[in-house]
Amino acid sequence: MNIDFVNVSARYGDKQVLYNVSLSIPYRSVYALIGPSGCGKTTLLRSINRLNDLIPGFALSGEIIIRGEPVYAMKNKRQIQNLRLKTGMIFQRPNPLPMSVMQNMIFPYMEHIHASLPEARRLAEEKLRVVGLYDEIKDRLNKPAYMLSGGQQQRLCIARSLMLPTDILLMDEPCSALDPISTFKIEDLLSGIKKNHTIIMVTHNTEQARRISDYTAFFYMGRLIEAGSTLQIFSAPKQELTQKYITGRM
Amino acid sequence: MRVKKVEKFHPTEWLMRVSAFAGILAIIFIFIFIFMKAAPVFAGSGLKLITGSGFDSQIAEAFDAPADAPLLSFGMSGLIAGTLLSTLLALVIAGILSVGAAITICELAPKPVAAMLLSVVRLMASIPSVVFGLIGAMIVVPFLENTFITVDMQIEFLAFFQMTGRNLLASVIVLAFMIAPTVITLSADALYSVPGIYKETGYAFGMSRFRVIQKILLPAARSGIIAGLILGAGRGIGEAIAVSMVCGGVGMIPSLSHGIAAIFTPVLPLAAAIVNKSEAMSVPAVESALFACGALLLLMGTLFALAARFYVKQFTYGGIHEV
């Protein structure tokens, strides 16, 4: 049950951003995508749940296969919505909706699942405990989510995506807007979530990739330069470019 | 380095201050002038001005009254009812149409079509109101008369009023089309200013386009849409010429006891009354009565403007909405 990228090329209008990327992401692992800005790693990430379809001019050739299903062969909107539902996404900036903390938690859940309100609230509290947020904010559950700190908001967003039946989590530099302590908390909880989720994470922080990922792929100028276990990439990279990037000489 | 000396007197700064104060003074004087002119009728009618009725005949009597015994008692409840009813009904119709149009422009239509639609809407806002009135009088009024109003109905209601195509419904239709551009423009602005990340968040949850619009975009744009409706209401309350051309010109209060036919009651909103009765303005009592109409309008308009300010403020400071 891997996520397989087969010859993926992508373009926005005339600008090609990915060239023939082929990559296989093992199930229930933490996979870090690293590389300098503009190398196409975010595009690759957002292609997985077809969120790039919203951008006019976006075109992808090749195929991404998830749970044995070719994602870009999906024509039916329902199928795509179902794919997105099962694929959680954490954005660079925390993205709580303008509602209370509790409403944020139960809103996507109630959108998709027939459940009573008390049931949803109970599940929400459970998921807030998973991300270690419940004890911090249990008296502020009905306050606007914007009143939480950035790190708390990001953990709220992670908890929110756990409300849905997700088994893949896409994270687009989830810690780049956060302080070191919040970053540490999020990294810490990923090891727990990993037990039943495949986590694909774009990061600019090579140290973070080294700390938490099982596998790492290095991208440069829209091309996959090297992919392999994190240990191998960071201790014995095969490509000179990778070596330069992880040692900060690029 | 030589530091530039701070000038004590800035001519431009003073020019700005003077113009600002001139604007404020002008508004204060308009208020004072209108209330001074209206004072005789306010004093002569007291509370009956708002509760009493029979404005049309009172104007005629005041016009014929001898100069040494002027008639200063008027009842404007019919006018106030006409103003509120036509504005509110127009607001309901315009609101539904406008929010739909704004969603189409912002979310559904392809970019070039949306740009075209938006410029058409802006153009609509700049059509002079008398043109709306003309279209109303030439198309809406005959249409209502030929389609809905039968001779039997006219006979049935002859005891109450003469039923023609010029009635509350005609005013509502004309007003709705006049209010719509304002509401569409403000709603579209509000929808455009919803952060794109909210929309992406919704799609990332696997929500369909319409659910995203319904559950995320509209609630987030709610204050802007409400502000648009309130500004539209301000325009509806103050609209004179177009409404006076189609309203029927009789200050009646539509009665629910007439059932659905109540929407065919001729009405006379305050602003239209000023236009309609202005021919009789040579008589001081009539003049004062029309200024009283103006004063009431001013009060209602001020109330709506304050409400609009309140909502726009809440909107621009990113007020947090419950969903």
Image (cartoon, rainbow, N blue to C red):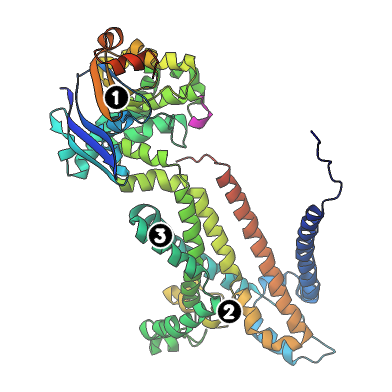
**Residue A165 seen by the camera:** no
Q: Which residue lies under the disc numbered 1?
A: A219
* Quarter placement of the C terminus of chain A: top left
Between B238 and A25, which is closer to the camera in this rendering? Answer: A25
Return the x and y of residue B207 as percentages of the image width and height: 30, 40
Does the magenta stretch mainly form a helix, a strand or a loop? helix
**B113 and B268: which one is in front?**
B113
Residue type, numbered disc 1: Phe
Q: Is residue A138 above or below residue B84?
A: above
Decide if residue A67 is in sight here. yes
Residue A236 as seen in the image, left or right of residue B255: left
Q: Secondary structure at mark 3?
A: helix
Q: Nearer the viewer, residue A6 or B238?
A: A6
Q: Badge 3 sits on which subunit?
A: B
Q: Quadrant of residue A222?
A: top left
Which percent across, then down, holds residue B192? 45, 49
**Residue positioned 43% across, 48% down in the render:** B218
Q: Which residue is mark 2?
A: B241
**Residue to which mark 3 is pinned:** B115
Marked residue chain, label 2: B
What's under tag 3, amino acid-wise?
A: Ala
**Which chain is mark 1 on?**
A
